[in-house]
Image (spheres, rainbow, N blue to C red):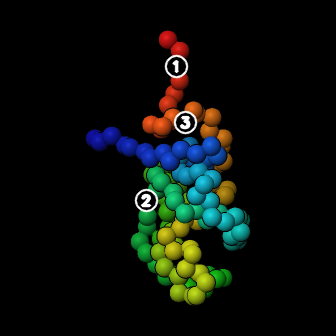
Amino acid sequence: MGVKCRENLGGKIIYRCDTCNTYLTHRGYLVSTRFASANGPFWLFKKVVNIHYDNAMSRNMVTGRHIVRYIYCKGCSAKLGWFYEMAFLNGQEYKEGCKILEVALIREETDDMPETPFGKHILSSV
């Protein structure tokens, strides 16, 4: 059995899967908080890690037709939202390559780990 590796992009305000606490992204990648559906609010992010994708499908949404893929947490396989692969209407291209995360399924935290030129490190006293 192989080792499960998880990515961490750092950030002071981070977002995790609410089910299993897997790191997903940080505030610097947040594009918009102005998305909603029958399930509640969704947020659009430029980059999200530790996810896997479903097959592409065409969906008609309020903002037009899009090719999307559902996205799932790598840690627990919870469905978190979707990935915009392609938009067909002018003015919607900014969504391409972005991920939508359902706010009810993620948790916002403040990361107080110290930043160094080499990444995040845990300080320990000997």
Disc 1/disc 2 C-alpha distance (Å): 34 Å
Question: For the point 58% across and 58% down, which residue is it?
Answer: 29
- Residue kind at label 2, given as amino acid type: His
Secondary structure category for the residue under label 3: strand
Secondary structure category for the residue under label 2: strand
Circles 1 and 2 in contact, beta carbons < 8 Å: no
- Residue kind at label 1, given as amino acid type: Ser
Q: Is residue 30 visible?
A: yes
> Which residue position is annotated with label 1?
124
Please tell me the numbered disc located at residue 52: 2
Q: Which residue lies furthest to the bottom in this view?
A: 89
Secondary structure category for the residue under label 1: loop
Residue 119 in the image: x percent, y percent? Answer: 47, 38
| Among numbered discs 1 and 2, the one appearing first in the sequence | 2
| Among numbered discs 2 and 3, the one appearing first in the sequence | 2
Q: Residue furthest left?
A: 1
Question: For the point 51% across and 27% down, which residue is it?
Answer: 122
Please tell me the numbered disc located at residue 115: 3
